[in-house]
Amino acid sequence: MSPLVETALFVFGLVALGYGAGASGYLKAEAGDALSDFAVRVALPLLLFRTMVTSSFHGSAPWQLWATYFTAVTMAWIAGHLATTRLFRRDGQAGVIGGVSAAFSNLVLLGIPFMLGVFGNEGFEILSLIISVHLPTMLMASILLFHWFGPRRREPLHPLAIIRDFLGRLLTNPLIIGIFAGLAWRASGIPLPTIANRFVDALADVAGPIALFAMGLGLKKFGLSGNLKPALVLSGLKLLLMPAVALAAAWLFGLPPFPAKVAVAAASLPSGVNSYLIAIQLKTEQSLASNQITIATAFSVVTTAFWLEVATALLG
């Protein structure tokens, strides 16, 4: 077994342990919520803060990287929307859920520890460049589509209201705060005090395992409750189409091999909880979103390892 595949299986094994703890009743669902809250609000923001402060990013080409990744996002989102509305005859709101389910990779709870395990700190630094743009971009797209396909109002919503909504969500997001705070500290040129560095290290170093275990524990509450055919199709688009487009785009934009492998790996990750949260906001297709998350996460154990091998074989 190649080291990349073994590491991928180890990462997903931690997710499986969390799921098993929830499915067996050993831990309650509330424990998963608390662990996820700690990971997203404390540990992962501090990990991103430390990365922004200390990393050199090894001369990465962010524009090529972003063009590669968001080409894959765009194609997967369009395909997911069309599959939901044309193939399964759902309405435009359901199409939003289909699009985001097929395109919104779980780059935080799963992606951060995955990249650290497979590619080390250098891979995580590349992923951080994607996350810094991914969260605001996908948030804005989701908000715009939410208002576009949401319930029609008697009076059209003013663009400034949409911008306020976006900025309010963005500037209160702990991950974005961690990134901005790290960039600000880096720009100041002031070294972190030793005691502060120890606090940051102590909490940031546990981010990965806790995030993975919490994600597995959280999957228990989604389960499967219908919509299996569309969920399977959307999972196929997420796990097969999106990384394939990322690989082709990396070649098209001339992305260097190492960032290209990170981009393909990121695109191959299963969908995160964001599609489910958007479904709750739209008050539609919650079952479709939850089923797709569960199915995609289960199959990604195999498909992500496959894309790692393909990317390594083609890119070196």
Image (tube, rainbow, N blue to C red):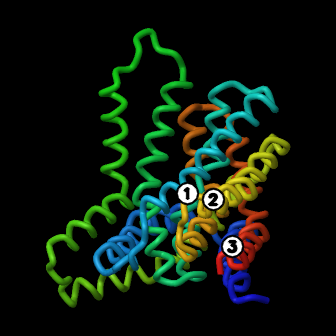
The amino acid marked with disc number 1 is: Tyr
Q: Which residue is mark 1?
A: 69
182 or 33: nearer the eye? 182
The amino acid marked with disc number 3 is: Ala
Find residue 242 and report its image quarter: bottom right
- Which image quarter holds the N terminus? bottom right
In-image side of 2 versus 187 (left or right): right
Above or below, comparing residue 239 to residue 18 in the picture: above
What percent of the width, then of the height, locates residue 251? Answer: 62, 63
Find residue 196 and report its image quarter: bottom left
Question: For the residue carrying disc 1, how many other residues have a C-alpha within 10 Å: few (<14), some (14-19), or many (20+)?
Answer: many
Which residue occupies the extreme top position in the image? Answer: 154
Residue at position x 54%, y 52% in the image:
70
Q: Which residue is mark 3?
A: 311
Q: Which residue is mark 2?
A: 246
Question: For the residue carrying disc 2, how many other residues have a C-alpha within 10 Å: few (<14), some (14-19), or many (20+)?
Answer: many
In-image side of 35 versus 190 (left or right): right
Q: Is there a contact, CB below 8 Å, between mark 3 and mark 2?
A: no
Residue at position x 72%, y 70% in the image:
307
What percent of the width, then of the height, locates residue 227? Answer: 80, 40
